[in-house]
Amino acid sequence: MNIKLLNKIAKVGTDRLDANKYEIGEDVAAPAGIMVRSAAMHEYAFNPELLAIARAGAGVNNIPLDRCTDEGIVVFNTPGANANGVKELVICGLMLAARDVVGGVEWAKTLTEDVAKTVEKGKSKFAGSEVRGKTLGIIGLGAIGGLVANTAVHLGMDVVGCDPYLSVEGAWNLNHHVRKGATYETIYSEADFITLHVPSTPQTKGMINKDTIAMMKDGVKILNFSRADLVNADDLKAALASGKVSSYVTDFPTEDVLGVPGVVAIPHLGASTEESEDNCAVMAALQLDDYLTNGNIKNSVNFPAVSMPRSTDCRICVLHKNIPAMLSTVTAAFSECGINIENMTNKSRGDAAYTMLDIVGCANDAILEKLNSTEGIIRVRVI
């Protein structure tokens, strides 16, 4: 099978793919799998053989998910693989928001003579505050937000977080000093610093706007290391100009905020560490290999997580729509073709579903024809 690389992927990751099984490169034809980081794929023409796309990173805005689902292409991401790298930059951003280090550094570059004396005379213009004892509000307590929360506790901050979708595992990993905010409004009203760690969705786009900013403390400092469109740029600039927001630190610069006083724009460096890139590449490669080899799905963003140990020599993987009676239709097809199902698992996610079946013997043309002609079935694979 061919694996196409649309971006440079760390070798430590591609080395996890068996060279005897895969041909890997930027120029391979008819790939069964694609590994990608930031390359735009919305206009990408999918070849019929393409089974899966592995994104070495968490965000999948560059991938046309609906089209992938319709064509039975499983899209993976690597949540948590770059979490520590992003967390460390968020903590850096926290300090940059508290103290005008950037402004001070730029000013220092302009000094040409009697520097020591000029520094002592002018440094007060860049004074800030310490974070110890301040309240940090965290919106989103996933892999990154949870690490930020725990680190901030150790910095002596009062940490309050809100995440309506917090997993049990995520809750267990939180420091017990992290307070639970019942709503986002709790974060807005209590926090001296607010940091965003949620994906860009129709519900979260523009969540920081004139109405939510009005709920915040005067002089609040906002950190955005998630996505640019979580913040309404016009409303933010007005709040910065009035002093309602004293600092905005973002890892997602746009034309709207570059050069605006009070904005520290970092050029999307959150996951730009050797360790993060290695971790993402390894995780993406292992997930892609497990799906292509065994049909197992872990960390897909468009199909459900489904995993099952192999119990026979032949496995049938059925990607289908999540509609009534589909599972009974699939199993009835095997019965009609005289094929015994040894083991089976099925799960759904939204409008998509996935069924894996280990069968006795081999899949014949009759069962494949029957499955492929069944309404609602998107793709059938034999492994």
Image (cartoon, rainbow, N blue to C red):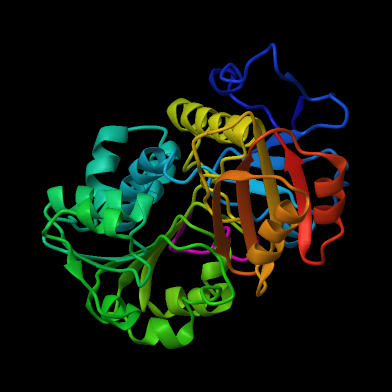
Q: Which is nearer the eye, 303 or 383?
A: 383
Residue 356 image point, x, y percent: 61, 47
Residue 259 image point, x, y percent: 56, 58
Left or right position of 130 against 332: left
Residue 183 image point, x, y percent: 31, 80
The image quarter containing residue 195 is bottom left
Q: Residue at x 24, y 48 (%)?
A: 121
Q: Residue at x 38, y 73 (%)?
A: 245
Q: Which is nearer the eye, 116 or 131?
A: 131
Q: Residue at x 56, y 40 (%)?
A: 296
Above or below residue 28? Residue 80 is below
Residue 214 image point, x, y percent: 38, 87
Query: Which residues are drawn in magenta?
Result: 255-264
**Can residue 99 be seen by looking at this rendering?**
no
Above or below residue 129? Residue 383 is above
Q: Seen from this angle, which residue lies furthest front?
A: 338
Q: Quadrant of the N terminus?
A: top right
Q: Specify the principal SS of the magenta part.
A: loop
Q: Residue at x 38, y 42 (%)?
A: 105
Q: Which is nearer the eye, 31 or 177?
A: 31
Q: Seen from this angle, which residue lies furthest top?
A: 20
Left or right position of 338 against 57: right
Left or right position of 7 against 210: right
Is residue 226 on the magenta stretch? no
**Can residue 12 be seen by looking at this rendering?**
yes
